[in-house]
Amino acid sequence: MADSCHSLGLDPRPVIAAAATKPFGFMPFYPGPVVGGHAGRLADAGAQVEYLDPLVPSARLAGAVRTAVTDPGATDWDLAVIHIVHPGTDLSWLDADRTLDVGHRLDAVAAAR
């Protein structure tokens, strides 16, 4: 949904909010940096957890408000977990040997190039 809105130049949050006003059982899900709360559990276990998402400038992760990383290439990551790739996102900093593509998005990005 966020990718579709982005390609149309729309902010997905008002689109989702508008759809949620309709009486046909729409369940609103908003874009966010965490899927299933895994980042919180990793942070609780002592892992350093950061995120990059141009649509989510800050988020509550593991009980603390965190801000999105603005320059991911400046950090030597142990692992980058890719869930969503927004159009126009620079992925040149990714190291293929230390990347987990859980949504299989990188194949589509490579095919589009």
Image (cartoon, rainbow, N blue to C red):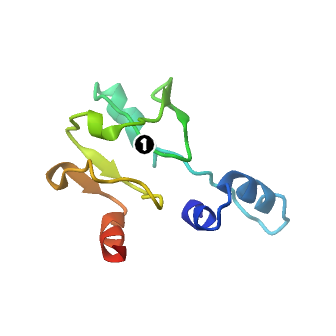
Query: In the image, is 30 to the left or to the right of 104?
Result: right
The N terminus: image quadrant: bottom right
Q: What residue would you read off at disc 1?
A: 52
Instruction: Give the percent coordinates (x, y) of residue 113.
Output: 33, 73
Give me the residue at 54% from left, 33% from top: 58
Residue lying at the far bottom of the rendered structure: 111
Instruction: Give the percent coordinates (x, y) of residue 47.
Output: 28, 29
Give me the residue at 56% from left, 47% from top: 55
The residue type indicated by label 1 comes to: Leu
Residue lying at the far left of the rendered structure: 97
Query: In the image, is 97 to the left or to the right of 74?
Result: left
Instruction: Give the percent coordinates (x, y) of residue 43.
Output: 35, 29
Please tell me in which quadrant of the rendered image residue 19 appears: bottom right
User: Where 85 sits versus 107, above or below?
Assistant: above
Q: Callout 1: helix, strand or loop?
A: loop
Give me the residue at 33% from left, 58% from top: 102
Instruction: Give the percent coordinates (x, y) of residue 63.
Output: 50, 24
User: Where 75 sits versus 22, above or below?
Assistant: above
